[in-house]
Image (tube, grey):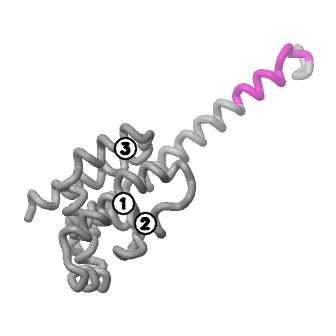
Amino acid sequence: MESLQEIPNLNLIIMVAAGVIIGIILFRVAQRILKTILIVAVIGLAYFFWQGGTVDELGQKGIDLFFKESRIDNMVDVNCPDQKAEKAKCDCVVIPTQKDLRNKFSISELAMLDKDWESLRREIGKSMQENEKEIRQCLLNNHGKKYIENISGIFENLKEGTKSN
């Protein structure tokens, strides 16, 4: 009878078996973690909609992220840093939106909008929708591809919001 030490490659066999067992355990744990994250996300969305949230609000959240609750007068200062990467966002979205709002409203109306972020956000959304083609084309022409996906999500959410109204 051979002793355990005499069996060739016993250490290798034990290591492979241990690796397979550890892999199976990790796979099952990861699977449960991913399921948990998915369930929490679905519950979060369900809660959002149950509390009266709408798809329009999801589009407005995109505007919040894009415009960072700026006001009309400081819109360019807040959203247009000196970095080259931000130039397309600034030239194609922020500056035209600010210009459009200034053309549509009087000084007193702009002052009222500046005091009410919800109204300003709605007007930013309308302005962006009205100039969607120009914004997209400008981003494509000015190397703003990283913003096209963000903008597309905002436009889709805004369109969904206008369909439900």
Residue of label 2: 76
Quadrant containing the C terminus is bottom left
Describe the element under mark 2 as helix, strand or loop: helix
Quadrant containing the N terminus is top right
Q: Could you classify mark 2 by the number of other residues whose Cα lies within 10 Å: few (under 14), some (14-19), or many (20 or more)?
A: some
Q: Residue at x 62, y 35 (%)?
A: 23
Q: Are marks 3 and 1 in contact (CB under 8 Å)?
A: no
In this image, 8 relative to 149: left or right?
A: right
Q: Residue at x 23, y 45 (%)?
A: 133
Q: Residue at x 23, y 49 (%)?
A: 132
In this image, 140 relative to 130: left or right?
A: right
Which residues fall within the magenta stretch? 6-17
Residue 7: image location, x then y, percent: 86, 15
Q: Is residue 11 magenta?
A: yes
Of the residues shown, which amino acid type is indicated by label 2? Val
Residue of label 3: 139
Of the residues shown, which amino acid type is indicated by label 1? Ile
Dominant secondary structure (helix, strand or loop) of the stretch shown in magenta: helix
Describe the element under mark 1 as helix, strand or loop: helix
Q: Earlier in the sequence, mark 2 or mark 1?
A: 2
Compute the Cα span from label 2 to label 1.
Answer: 6 Å
Describe the element under mark 3 as helix, strand or loop: helix
Residue 54: image location, x then y, percent: 20, 66
In this image, 146 relative to 54: left or right?
A: right
Where is residue 123, by image quadrant? bottom left
In this image, 149 relative to 155: left or right?
A: right
Residue of label 1: 95
Q: Out of 55 and 50, give the one closest to the viewer.
A: 55
Q: Could you classify mark 1 by the number of other residues whose Cα lies within 10 Å: few (under 14), some (14-19), or many (20 or more)?
A: some
